[in-house]
Image: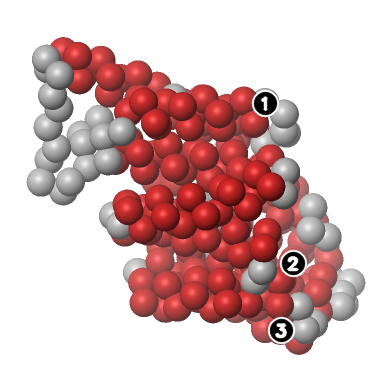
Amino acid sequence: MLELLPLVFAAPNDALARAEAVLHTDPPPLHASVAHQVIGIWQRDWGDLRLALDHLRRARTLAARADSAEREADVLATLGVALVHAGRTRQGLAAFERGIERGTGHTRARVRYRRAYSWWVLGHHREALDDLRRAITVLRQADDVIWTARALTLRATVHLALGAVDRADADFTAAEALWDTTGQEHDKADAVESRGSPRSARGTYRRRCGCWTRPRSGTPSWVRPPSCWTSGAARC
């Protein structure tokens, strides 16, 4: 069942169909939790955010019924992202806190990654980097290629927002190398596309004789987040 979670980003409609099929078989709570989470992710990123929240709350309830703290933590992280996107920031951050409390090790690292994404959305770049630093260490130790690549891609984007062009370029390059070993073509395309941002930024830097300016929002004008994130698909 857990294989449906990465599939929702590699082949979204296939993952959705398979998750819906699972729910028609009267599955045990653990399997039903995964299915509802997959549907919730699909609805969050490509459908109706209201339906997404409904499915993700069901996924959390079912994870608790299955007495799986790790499953519950993972769902709470996905729910946190959806709540932030829905403008319910306080509830979203509370979901992340609960997820970090419930999860351990590898799961907790994935919760931190998703909270870092939300910190970035909210403009809290230093907090995002702190969560990513902790998450990437554990994800690498666990040899989790997909989540490490996601975290590196996000960290590169945060570095760009802070003007750390060389660090961003290094993280985008490392992420792209990892994506080459997976079947996550959507994620790989985002990393490849995003690698152009540091190069463009570096050219801007040079053209301006060693300086670049920030707009009043605090983010350099040449920073353009990966298209999947601006449309809501946070790979979370």
The reply to whether residue 12 is in sight is no
- Residue at the image position 57 percent from the left and 73 percent from the top: 99
Pointer 3 with pointer 2, Cβ within 8 A: no
N-term mark: 3 or 1 = 3
N-term mark: 3 or 2 = 2
User: Dividing the picture into quarters, in which one does residue 177 lie?
Assistant: top right
Q: Position of residue 106 (x, y in %)?
A: 68, 59
Near mark 3 (Cα within 10 A), the count class, few <14, some 14-19 or many ≥20, is some
Res 64 label: 3
The reply, left or right, for residue 163 in relation to residue 170 is left
Quarter of the picture containing the N terminus is: bottom right
The reply to whether residue 32 is in sight is yes
Q: Position of residue 196 (x, y in %)?
A: 40, 22
Type of amino acid at the residue the image marks with label 3 = Ala
Q: Which residue is mark 2?
A: 34
Q: In this orientation, which residue lies closer to the viewer: 216 or 163?
A: 163
Type of amino acid at the residue the image marks with label 2 = Val
How far apart marks 3 and 2 lie (CA) works out to: 12 Å
Res 180 label: 1
How far apart marks 3 and 1 lie (CA) works out to: 36 Å
